[in-house]
Image (cartoon, rainbow, N blue to C red):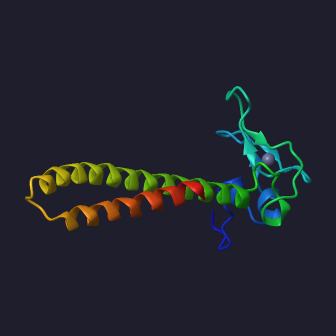
Amino acid sequence: MTKADAKPSWPSEFTKIEHAQGYSYGAYGGLNGRPYVAGKCCETVLPRDSFGHSHQCTRKNGFGPAGLFCKAHDPIARKAKDEAERAKREAEWEAEKLRNKMDALAFDIAEMCVKVFAQQQPFEKLEQMTAAYKDLRDKVEKDGAS
Ligand SMILES: [Zn+2]
């Protein structure tokens, strides 16, 4: 590619109809592919059985950049979906960390109970730890509800 205005390599990156119009669908080795069909989604898809050549998506376009994509292949929607999934995983990871913290603290509280009972530690320490535990529990419950 010698043009300054380099075309995206993959249909999922197309932003202009010119990108799709210059693309060859299913080109393989030295074989020429098929040209872009207007009105159809510009994404390239593999055959259902994964054998044979890829081809242009047969669904109607109208979504994504320049309306080049079908609803399923809209890269903007896909990106948003990926982002939402990532955020969800992160929230789950955070909740898991909080639960682990609670488990560890519950054990420490149990140990502290023994020490307070044996008058090796002041009662206030146990109160502080119990309050910290309650804070964590409230946080977990709040996150779980949202
Ligand atoms: Zn499509």
User: Would residue 63 appear left or right of 126 to someone viewing this image?
Assistant: right
User: Would residue 98 appear left or right of 73 to someone viewing this image?
Assistant: left
Q: Nearer the viewer, residue 74 or 111?
A: 111
Q: Name the residue located 15 percent from the left edge and 57 percent from the top edge.
A: 116
Q: Nearer the viewer, residue 146 or 124?
A: 124
Q: Name the residue located 60 percent from the left edge and 59 percent from the top edge.
A: 146
Q: Nearer the viewer, residue 108 or 143?
A: 108
User: Would residue 64 appear left or right of 123 to someone viewing this image?
Assistant: right
User: Would residue 59 appear left or right of 32 to someone viewing this image?
Assistant: right
Q: Horizontal and vertical percent for residue 145? A: 59, 56
Q: How many marks?
A: 0
Is residue 86 in view? Answer: no
Is residue 45 in view? Answer: yes
Residue at the bottom extreme?
Answer: 4
Q: Horizontal and vertical percent for residue 22? A: 78, 57
Q: Name the residue located 64 percent from the left edge and 39 percent from the top edge.
A: 29
Q: Horizontal and vertical percent for residue 114? A: 15, 50
Q: Eyeballing the image, is 95 above or below 123?
A: above
Q: Quadrant of the N terminus?
A: bottom right
Q: Horizontal and vertical percent for residue 96? A: 42, 50
Q: Name the residue located 43 percent from the left edge and 57 percent from the top edge.
A: 137
Q: Nearer the viewer, residue 34 or 68?
A: 68
